[in-house]
Image (spheres, rainbow, N blue to C red):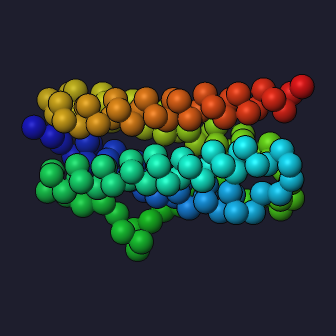
């Protein structure tokens, strides 16, 4: 059925989703300025309605595979570009950080999809496809925010 690579990728994705929730909510709390409102709303909504749900689904799948998601002592932060900016009006740096880490998530879910196919694990494959779609949509939304800053 599944293999160690699938478990490793599921655990990594869970860690990333939890870190993303923290960073999105923090940035949604600290950003300032009129131009920040739409970005803050998107970050807040995505953290609560997508990223956290992704983590829950990944955790459930790990349990189904007789594994478990990493807890706080195993947490490994990696999202340097999503740390709140010193200048809380620097919305562009947050937009760029979101785009960077959405691309990282897309890469992770594509790797999970491939590993699940190789392991003949269609349940994990379907999960990866579903979450991949959400991540691509969110990256697209933030690319459009980015275009608005070029004008």
Residue 120 in which image quadrant: top left
Residues 91 and 96: in front is 91
Side of 119 where 87 appears, left or right: right
Furthest toward the right, the residue is 151
Residue 97 placement, left or right of 72: right
**Residue 111 visible, this angle:** no
Outermost residue toward the left?
1
Q: How many marks?
A: 0
Q: Position of residue 86 (x, y in %)?
A: 83, 62
* Residue drawn at point x = 15 percent, y = 40 percent: 2
Q: What residue is rendered at 18% in x and 30% in y? A: 122
Q: Position of residue 42 (x, y in %)?
A: 63, 45
Q: Nearer the viewer, residue 49 or 77?
A: 49
Q: Residue at x 47, y 49 (%)?
A: 49
In the rendered view of the protein, which quadrant contains the N terminus? top left
Question: Is residue 57 toward the left or the right of residue 151 in the image?
Answer: left
Q: Is 51 located above or below residue 145 in the figure?
A: below
Would residue 147 appear left or right of 61 to someone viewing this image?
right
In this view of the protein, which residue sits in the foreground, 35 or 124? Answer: 35
Asked if residue 71 shows in the view, the reply is yes
Give coordinates of residue 79: x percent, y percent.
60, 53
> Taking 74 as reference, is 80 above or below it?
above
Please state, as top left, top right, bottom left or bottom right, where the C terminus lies in the image: top right
Give the x, y percent position of residue 24: 61, 54
User: Which residue is at the far bottom?
Assistant: 73
Residue at horizontal 19%, vertical 35%? 123
């Amino acid at each position: 059925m599944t293999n160690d690579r699938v478990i490793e990728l599921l655990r990594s994705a869970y860690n990333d989703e939890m870190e993303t929730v923290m960073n999105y909510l923090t940035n949604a709390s600290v950003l300032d300025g009129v131009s920040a409102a739409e970005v803050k709303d998107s970050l807040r909504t995505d953290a609560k309605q997508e990223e956290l749900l992704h983590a829950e689904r990944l955790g459930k799948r790990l349990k189904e595979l007789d594994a478990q998601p990493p807890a706080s002592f195993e947490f490994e932060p990696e999202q340097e570009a999503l740390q709140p900016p010193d200048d809380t009006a620097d919305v562009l740096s947050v937009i760029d950080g979101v785009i960077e880490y959405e691309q990282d998530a897309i890469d992770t879910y594509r790797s999970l999809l491939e590993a699940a196919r190789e392991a003949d694990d269609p349940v994990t494959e379907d999960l990866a496809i579903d979450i991949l779609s959400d991540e691509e949509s969110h990256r697209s939304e933030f690319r459009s925010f980015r275009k608005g800053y070029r004008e």
